[in-house]
Image: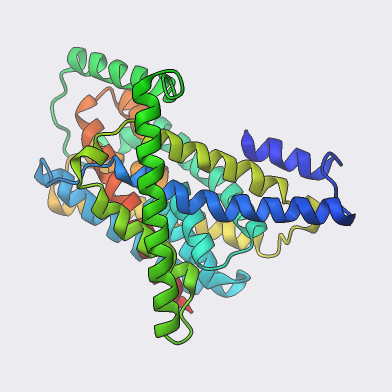
């Protein structure tokens, strides 16, 4: 919805397109897009819990799922990459997105110096293809996987209650009490303070490494430093236990989304290679799902865990409760969310690695 609103604003004459006003607006838009992502990453990573796998299947599904995405990208690039303008950067951004989520794609976009209009276009393609993938999973994928792989016995009555509870949590207003309670203000101020410290330290590291390493990109080192320091900070219990971090981080992503879309003049966008990009996305998602299921067959991972791992990588963790509800299996809720957390944590590294590989 935010992309849609931003694109309308950009293309029906609401925003100035010429003169000093247009230049001032562009500077403000650049400021918002450059500031929101570095602030969002720590806020979204502080609240995550990293712990050893609770089950063998969860650990194997996590490893094979990551491997499946990387293999799909590496296998697809020689076919589609040569036909895609700026192919290595596109591959890096999509790797980050398909292992983590939108925040990873945006972060890698910034770290690799991608134009904001390119990010908006690539994210639109991803939404179209990933939605198609999600519909396929819900309509056919779950049943096909259960025919192909072992199925663990489900206690449907208990599962339905657990899933309803999780879905109700997902529907709650995540900002409730943020500005109306003492705890809300307390958490907000500490989160913002720690985030600014992390961003400041990361900027220092980025500047230092970009000077030490010839040809090094400040933004790339900056984003990777933010990711690493934020993961380390997430182990500090008083900060980890603060509420609202993920919600505030997502709000910054919402701001980024509408601002990026407001910069996209449809008439000026370069749709060159659009069919090849969409084909590349379909290839990556189909191949990664196929490899995930084949790996599950080899390692005897149950059907629902294999499918939820694929969904959490390709569509990101917020879709896990919906797919668990479709499965009527609450047992996969925590494995799915835990796998997604790892994806958020490693997505930035993998995106930059794939870019460097194909460059």
87 and 138: which one is in front?
87
Residue 64 placed where, x, y %? 24, 55
Residue at image coords 22%, 55%: 63
Quadrant in which the N terminus appears: top right
Q: Is residue 28 at all visible to an observer of this figure?
A: yes
Which colouring convention does the figure follow? rainbow
Residue 323, above or below 41: above
Q: How many marks?
A: 0
Left or right? Give the position of 8 relative to 20. Answer: left
Left or right? Give the position of 199 relative to 333. Answer: right
206 and 82: which one is in front?
206
Residue at image coords 15%, 18%: 155
Residue 328 placed where, x, y %? 28, 22
Residue 255, above or below 95: above
Residue at image coords 18%, 15%: 158
Residue 214, above or below 340: below
54 and 229: which one is in front?
229
Residue at image coords 43%, 62%: 223
Which residue is the extreme one toward the right?
19
Residue 332 placed where, x, y %? 23, 33
Residue 127 placed where, x, y %? 55, 44
Which residue is the extreme one toward the bottom?
214
In terms of image quadrants, where is residue 46? top left
Left or right? Give the position of 97 relative to 235. Answer: right
298 and 107: which one is in front?
107
Q: Is residue 72 at all visible to an observer of this figure?
A: no
């Amino acid at each position: 919805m935010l992309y849609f609103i931003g694109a309308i604003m950009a293309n029906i004459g609401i925003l100035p397109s010429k003169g000093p006003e247009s230049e001032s607006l562009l500077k403000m838009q650049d400021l918002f897009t450059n500031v929101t992502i570095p602030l969002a990453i720590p806020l979204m990573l502080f609240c995550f819990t990293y712990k050893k796998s609770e089950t063998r299947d969860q650990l194997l599904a996590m490893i094979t799922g990551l491997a499946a995405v990387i293999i799909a990208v590496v296998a697809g690039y020689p076919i589609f990459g040569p036909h895609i303008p700026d192919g290595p950067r596109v591959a890096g951004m999509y790797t980050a997105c398909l292992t983590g989520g939108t925040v990873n794609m945006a972060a890698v976009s910034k770290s690799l110096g991608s134009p904001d209009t390119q990010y908006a276009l690539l994210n639109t393609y991803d939404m179209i293809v990933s939605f198609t993938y999600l519909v396929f999973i819900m309509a056919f994928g779950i049943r096909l996987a259960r025919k192909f792989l072992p199925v663990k016995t489900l206690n449907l009555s208990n599962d339905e209650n657990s899933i309803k509870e999780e879905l109700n949590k997902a529907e709650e207003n995540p900002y409730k009490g943020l500005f109306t309670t003492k705890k809300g203000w307390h958490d907000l101020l500490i989160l913002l303070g720690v985030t600014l410290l992390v961003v400041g330290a990361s900027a220092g590291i980025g500047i230092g490494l970009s000077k030490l390493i010839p040809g090094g990109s400040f933004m790339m080192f900056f984003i990777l430093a933010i990711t690493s320091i934020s993961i380390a900070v997430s182990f500090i219990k008083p900060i980890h236990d603060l509420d609202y971090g993920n919600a505030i981080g997502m709000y910054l992503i919402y701001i980024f989304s509408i601002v990026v879309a407001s910069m996209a003049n449809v008439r000026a966008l370069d749709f060159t290679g659009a069919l090849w990009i969409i084909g590349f996305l379909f290839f990556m998602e189909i191949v990664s799902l196929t490899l995930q299921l084949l790996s599950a067959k080899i390692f005897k991972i149950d059907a629902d865990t294999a499918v939820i791992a694929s969904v959490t990588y390709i569509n990101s963790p917020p879709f896990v409760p919906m797919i668990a509800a479709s499965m009527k299996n609450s047992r996969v809720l925590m494995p799915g969310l835990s796998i997604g957390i790892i994806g958020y944590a490693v997505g930035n590294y993998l995106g930059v690695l794939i870019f460097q590989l194909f460059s």
